[in-house]
Image: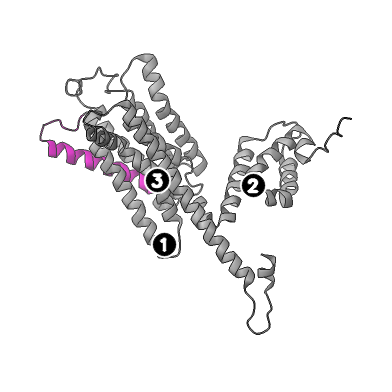
Amino acid sequence: MNPPNPIPGPAETGSPLERRYRRLLRAYPRRYQAERGGEIVATYLDLADPKRRWPSPHDALDLLGAGFRERLRGYGALGLADALPLAATAALNTLIAFAVFLLLQVELNDSHVTGLDPVGPFQTLGAVAWLGWLLVGVAATTLPGPWARLAAAGGLLLTIALPPVAALTGQPRPPLFVLLPAIALGLATLALPTHPSGVGRSLPLLAAGFGILVSVAFAAGERGGNWFTSYRSTPETLAMAGGLMLALSLIIGLGRALRADDTGLWATLLLATPAGLFAADQLSQAIAGSRGGAPTPTAFAATTGAIVLAGVALLAAAIAGQAARHRTVRQRALDSTCPTCGHRTDATARM
C-alpha cells in the first residue's frame, strides 16, 4: 500500500511568485519565518505587479538583506551588518588611492622603462580598471548611494574581467598579486552607504590626493632610478598599503569602541582579508625562500587560499564568540527576578 501524499507546505502552494518569495524567506531564522513569514510575503505580493512571476531584484536583495540582519540580531552581532557601509567606504577610498598610484607610477610610465608592449597610452589593460575605480569615486561623491553601488559593481566587473580579456587579446595585464586584493576590496564596496555623510562624500577626493602625494614622493626618492615603475617592483609597496589600511581601520574601530560602538572593530575584521591579500606575494616569496627556491604559482595560490581561510575563520570566530556572549546575557536576563518579591518584568518574561 502506497503511503499517503504529504500535505504541501506554504512553500509549495500559491502562485509561482508567492512560492519564490517564500524561498527567499529562508534567509530568515526558522522561528521568524514561522511567526511573520506569511505577513511578509503578503506585503510583497500586495505591492507587486499581478502579472509578475519572479521577485524584482530590489525585492530579492531587500529580503535577503533583512534576513541576514535578523540572523545577526539573533547572534547579538548586529554591529557586523552596520559595519558593512563603513568597510565599503574604507575599501573604496583605498582602491582610489591604489588606482591613482598605479596609474601614475606604472601605467603612464615609459614603455622602454617597463619593458612592456604598451596598450595605447598605457602599459597594460589594468589602466581600464584603475580609471573605472576613479569613476566610482566620482559617483560616490556626486550621486545617490544606490547609483554609487551600481558604479562599484561596474568597477568590480571591470577588474574581474582583466585576466580573461588579457588572455583573449594577448595584451599585458597587472599580475594576480595586484588584482586579487583589488577584487576583494571591490566586493566590499558593494555595501556603500545608501545615505553617505558629507565627510564620506569628500573622502574620495582626499584619497586621490593621497595617491598623488605618495607617487610624487616615490618619484622624488627614486631620483631617476626607476625602482618602482613596474608591477613587479610593487609587492613591498602593496604590503605596506594593506598594513596601513588595516591599521587605520583598527584605530578608528578602537575610537568607536570607546563610545560603545563596535561597528569599527567589525569593519576591521571585514577588511582583514583584503589587507592580507595585499601581502600575499611577499608571504609566498618568504615561504619559497625558506625552502631554498623562487616563489611559484603553487606557493602563491596556497598563500592566497590560506589568507582567505584565515580571514573567514577569524570572522566566524568573532560571530561565534559574540553569539555565546549574547546567549549568556540573555539567560541572565531570563533568570533575573526582583530580590524582594520575586517578580519578573514583562520584557524579561517575553524574552
Q: Which of marks 3 and 2 is nearer the N terminus?
A: 2
Left-right relation of 348 to 85:
right
Q: Give the range drawn in magenta.
A: 202-229
Q: Is label 1 in a helix, a strand or a loop?
A: helix
Q: Is label 2 in a helix, a strand or a loop?
A: loop
- Amino acid carrying label 2: it is Tyr
- Amino acid carrying label 3: it is Leu
Check if residue 76 falls in the magenta segment: no
Q: Which residue is at a point 72% across and 38% down the rendered structure image?
A: 48
Residue marked by disc 2: 28
Left-right relation of 266 to 107:
right
Label 1 to label 3: alpha-carbon separation = 17 Å
Figure check: 112 above or below 341: above
Figure check: 115 above or below 47: above
Which residue is at the far front? 1
Residue marked by disc 3: 271
Q: In which quarter of the image is the C terminus?
A: bottom right
Using the image, tell me which numbered label, if any, was put on residue 257. Answer: 1
Where residue 173 sits in the image (x, y, percent)?
32, 23
Check if residue 205 falls in the magenta segment: yes
- Amino acid carrying label 1: it is Ala
